[in-house]
């Protein structure tokens, strides 16, 4: 990053956006394809998705801090940070909070 005076560009607030292919992620975790979202909700801390595949049901909770939990038929299948390292179905993007410009990391 370029240094400007006594401050670096990292002094600006950064927003991280996580995009995830929910159906693909559940297929990765369960081996079953074609999951569908049938309900979703969000609050100030997280977004939750109720999903189904035939008689199987799943709850996916994505917290705004990057943490995620996945339960399928009451069994925990994932509990941790959602990153490209933990799921090929996750994509992270970083933006400057003050102006929305995309930050490209090398």
Image: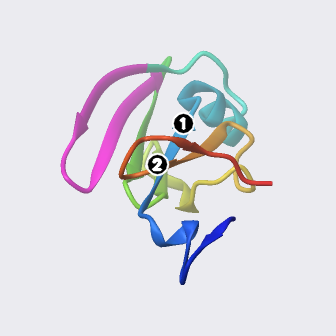
Is 100 drawn above or below residue 66 in the view shown? Answer: above
Whether residue 55 is visible: no
Rendered location of residue 7, percent (x, y): 53, 78
Name the quarter where the C terminus is drawn.
bottom right
| Label 2 element class | strand
Is 39 drawn above or below residue 26 in the view shown? Answer: above
**Distance from label 1 to label 2 (Cα)?**
19 Å
Q: Which residues are magenta?
A: 37-52
Foreground residue among 34 and 98: 98
Name the quarter where the N terminus is drawn.
bottom right
Which residue does the numbered mark 1 point to in the structure image? 19
Front label number (1 vs 2): 1
Classify 10 Å Cα crowding around label 2: few (below 14), some (14-19), many (20 and above). Answer: some
Q: Is residue 49 magenta?
A: yes
Foreground residue among 9 and 106: 9
Image position of 79 (left or right of 40): right
């Amino acid at each position: 990053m370029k240094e400007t005076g006594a401050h670096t560009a990292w002094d600006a607030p950064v927003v991280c956006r996580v995009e995830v292919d929910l159906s693909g992620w559940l297929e990765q975790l369960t081996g079953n394809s074609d999951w569908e979202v049938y309900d979703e909700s969000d609050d100030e801390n997280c977004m939750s998705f109720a999903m189904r595949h035939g008689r199987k049901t799943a709850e996916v909770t994505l917290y705004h801090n990057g943490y995620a939990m996945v339960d399928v038929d009451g069994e925990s299948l994932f509990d941790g940070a959602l990153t490209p390292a933990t799921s090929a179905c996750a994509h992270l993007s970083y933006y400057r909070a003050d102006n929305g410009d995309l930050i490209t990391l090398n």
